[in-house]
Image (cartoon, grey):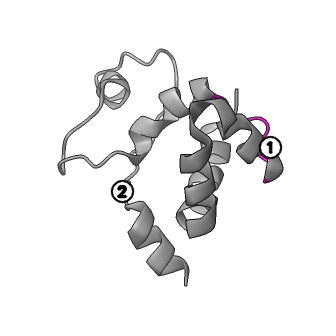
Amino acid sequence: MASLERFTELMRVVAADDALRARLEKAGDAGRAGVLASIGFTDITDGDASKYSVHFQPRKAGELNAAELATVAGGAGNTITTTTTTTTVTASASAAAAT
């Protein structure tokens, strides 16, 4: 499984490349791994997409997902946590910002 940072790197690459997005869409589920391998992301799995895609979904301001809520409520175990502000950007906005 890839890390969130690695998955985020993939999302940035995809957001900045219209042709790559078209290739991924055309490849569908069966060909997605091959397209990702061709650009050096052989470590990204469907499981990673399921696990990390929540970080790239639009949310209302102030709304927490289950993992964030557990961390705030102390349910994340014996870990030191920090608060981060995340800005969700759509793929087209990311692509525009990258140019």
In the rendered image, the vertical position of residue 6 relative to residue 50, given as above or below: below
Cα–Cα span, label 1 and label 2: 26 Å
The label shown at residue 99 is: none
* Label 1 sits on residue: 37
Q: Position of residue 20 (x, y in %)?
A: 63, 60
Report whether 80 appears left or right of 19: left
In the rendered image, residue 91 lying in the magenta stretch gets the answer: no
> Do we see residue 44 in this rendering?
no
> Residue flagged by tag 2: what amino acid is it?
Thr
Q: Which residue range is magenta in the image?
A: 39-45
- What SS does tag 1 mark? helix
Rendered-image quadrant of the C terminus: bottom right
In the rendered image, the vertical position of residue 59 relative to residue 51, given as above or below: below
Report whether 95 appears left or right of 38: left
Residue nearer the viewer, 56 or 63: 56
The residue that appears at 54% across and 33% down in the rendered structure is 49
Q: Position of residue 92 (x, y in %)?
A: 41, 69
The residue that appears at 18% across and 51% down in the rendered structure is 61
Question: Farthest front residue?
Answer: 26
Residue nearer the viewer, 31 or 80: 31
Residue 42 sits in which quadrant?
top right
Q: Position of residue 8 (x, y in %)?
A: 58, 50
Residue 72 sits in which quadrant?
top left
- What SS does tag 2 mark? loop
The label shown at residue 88 is: 2
Count how many numbered circles sit on residues in the image.
2
> Residue flagged by tag 1: what amino acid is it?
Ala
Residue nearer the viewer, 26 or 63: 26
